[in-house]
């Protein structure tokens, strides 16, 4: 009789259900309380930011609340640091740095927002409701704060892997 298989919580590779770590990527497979994803993947600040940049233009799959909000915090902190740097070195240089950072995070920010919408079982096209003044921003904020659907939905498995 063959052993039951499951999918790695990090890389999506196939492994046995009893495996404590993935043989492909070495990621732990035990659920951690308060990890933020409900799927056992640790959603720490560094892990979430790294995941968002590694999925630079991946618009498929899902992103739990923790992954999205850690990335937002990263963007806010960097913008604050650029503002402080602007006071120290001059506004022209900080504007250039700010523009370069904005371009660098544009696609990752949109892609993690789309994956966050997928986690709530909404199409990524709903992201463009942000263009509706006030109402669009409020609606997106509510959706981004809402817990994603438990288990698989039409956009993928709860661990972010696309179907």
Image: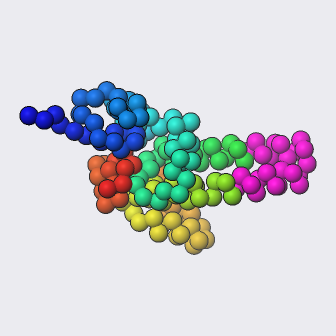
Q: What span is colored magenta in the figure?
A: 80-102
Task: Give the main secondary structure of the magenta stretch.
Answer: helix
Residue toward you, 58 or 67:
58
Residue placed at 52% from the left, 70% from the top?
Answer: 129
Q: How is the image coloured?
A: rainbow
Residue toward you, 159 or 54:
54
In this picture, residue 36 sits left or right of residue 68: left
In this picture, residue 12 sits left or right of residue 44: left
Identify the image quadrant of residue 17.
top left
Identify the image quadrant of residue 29.
top left
Residue placed at 47% from the left, 51% from the top?
Answer: 145
> x and y percent of residue 50 in the render?
55, 41
Residue placed at 78% from the left, 46% from the top?
Answer: 82
Q: Give the number of marks.
A: 0
In this picture, residue 101 sits left or right of residue 108: right
Residue toward you, 134 or 98:
98
> x and y percent of residue 46 in the render?
56, 36
User: Looking at the image, which residue sits at the far bottom?
Assistant: 132
In this picture, residue 150 sits left or right of residue 90: left
User: Looking at the image, which residue sits at the far left?
Assistant: 1
Q: Is residue 138 magenta?
A: no
Q: Is residue 90 magenta?
A: yes
Residue toward you, 115 or 148:
115
Residue placed at 40% from the left, 42% from the top?
Answer: 11
User: Looking at the image, which residue sits at the far top?
Assistant: 20
> x and y percent of residue 163 in the render?
32, 56
Rendered-image quadrant of the N terminus: top left
The answer to whether any part of residue 38 appears in the image is no
> x and y percent of residue 34 in the render?
42, 33
The answer to whether any part of residue 65 appears in the image is yes
């Amino acid at each position: 009789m063959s052993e039951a298989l499951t999918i790695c919580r990090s890389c999506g590779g196939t492994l046995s259900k009893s495996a404590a770590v993935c043989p492909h990527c070495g990621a732990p497979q035990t659920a951690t309380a308060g990890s933020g994803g409900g799927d056992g993947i640790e959603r720490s600040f560094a892990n979430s930011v790294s995941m968002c940049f590694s999925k630079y233009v991946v618009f498929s799959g899902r992103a739990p609340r923790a992954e999205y909000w850690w990335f937002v915090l990263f963007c806010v902190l960097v913008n604050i640091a650029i503002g402080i740097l602007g006071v120290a070195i001059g506004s022209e240089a900080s504007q250039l740095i700010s523009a370069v950072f904005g371009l660098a995070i544009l696609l990752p920010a949109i892609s993690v927002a789309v994956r966050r919408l997928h986690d709530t079982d909404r199409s990524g096209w709903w992201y463009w409701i942000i263009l509706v003044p006030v109402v669009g921003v409020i609606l997106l904020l509510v959706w981004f704060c809402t817990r994603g659907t438990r288990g698989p939905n039409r956009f993928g498995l709860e661990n972010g892997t696309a179907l």
